[in-house]
Amino acid sequence: MNGNSGKGIEVLVKPVSFDCNLACGYCFYKKTSGLYPSGLNPLEKTHLMTDTVLEKMIAECMEYSNGKPAIFSWQGGEPTLAGLDFFKKAVGFQSKYGKPGQIISNSVQTNGILIDTNWTGFFKKYNFFIGISLDGPEEANGVYRQYPSGKSCYRETMQAVELLKKEEIDFNVLVTIGAKTAKDPEKLYEFFLSHGLKYLQFIPALDRAEGAGGTNGGGQMPSFAPAPEAYGDFLCGLFDCWWNGGKPKASVRFFDNLCEIAFGMEPTACIFKKQCGSYVVIEYNGDVYPCDFFVSREYKLGNITETPVKELISKARGGFGKLKETGHEDCRGCEWNFICNNGCLWNRLVKNGNINDKDYLCAAYRRFFKHSYGRLQGAAKSAKRKQ
């Protein structure tokens, strides 16, 4: 026994660090280049997790999970730049170090550009779940998601979407909402429905304000970040499209998480949990962090090739994880704090550089909860009466 009596392990792996074949205008992870300017080979600027680090990471994770579910989420940058052979080695190590009958889950968050039938055959064989980054129709997707040359990537991403559908690969769509794309939620929602895309995740485009944490007490948010008022309007408009008289035609993760809360369940989204630390991030060289928004020297937990994963996870949950329990004074009497539990740590930090500040999107969420939660509560009560 290794002392893990919980639910297993969940890790978010960055096999190529911030390397990407796109140059998205809202990418918060590009700043990681300050930590990892070159790969393990100083003569190369690209990054790729070595076989040694990959095997050590998986061996540690499988031992810690102790036969319970082991969840690997492969992200970037663009994780498919690691190559198909890399992922074949990964599932080989999972098989080598896993226990008979153990549940091992793999997901890849990708822009889809490199996806072809070789990839889909592999995904299907090993039951990978895929997240496709797509911000809507071509004009919306092209606002922030582009090649380094400025060329649109819409056609290639949609080709990947159609291939995943044809090959019956389970996937959802990650939609990042910026200041310029938050204005017409109905058009966005109808676009996804019209293309048969019914598993959706909408997230706001946020990053640290310029001058955050300085003597002026705050800074100018990036131009791509939606204002709280605009994001509140977006959520309310999107919810009204989705609700459809209590008969939604699609799954929207944010709304699904609220349904969990309305039904008295533990929410799966980390932003709604009472503590952070439900997963750790593992960079290409084995460095470990408590959250992919907090990949910085200040929050580094250690390296998986040097420190047992049990100790790293304990640090994440015991130190960083408990920061969420301390909220801004305005949170204490807020009628909606039972949902957001003092807000997302990253959202609390972005504006003023103070992790104990209010969630930057607090006003948006307060307005949205007031607009939507009563309907969700009513649906939950009705469903419970029918049981």
Image (cartoon, rainbow, N blue to C red):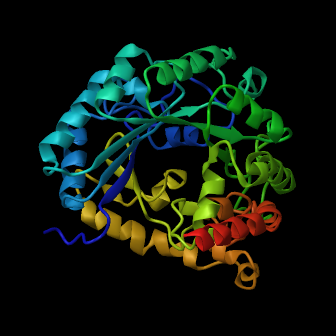
The answer to whether residue 45 is seen in the rendering is no
Q: Residue lying furthest front in this view? A: 386
Residue occupying the point 73% across, 83% down: 329
On screen, residue 169 versus residue 233, left or right, reads left
Q: Residue at x 61, y 56 (%)?
A: 256
Determine if residue 141 is in view: yes
Residue placed most toward the observer, 68 or 80: 68
Q: Quadrant of the C terminus?
A: bottom right
- Position of residue 251 measured from the top left corner of the image (x, y, whole percent): 61, 46
**Viewport quadrant of the N terminus:** bottom left
Place of residue 372 in the rendered image (x, y in percent of width and height, measured from the top left): 78, 62
**Apparent side of residue 164 relative to residue 59 in the rendered image (left or right):** right
* Viewer-proximal residue among 249 and 11: 249
Which residue corresponds to the image point at 46% horizontal and 60% vertical from the top-left?
A: 299
Residue occupying the far bottom of the picture: 333
Q: Position of residue 87 (x, y in %)?
A: 30, 30
Drawn side of residue 355 relative to residue 110, left or right: right
317 with respect to 25 (left or right): left
Q: Which is nearer the eye, 364 or 312?
A: 364
Where does the image place residue 381, in percent across and percent down from the top left? Answer: 66, 72
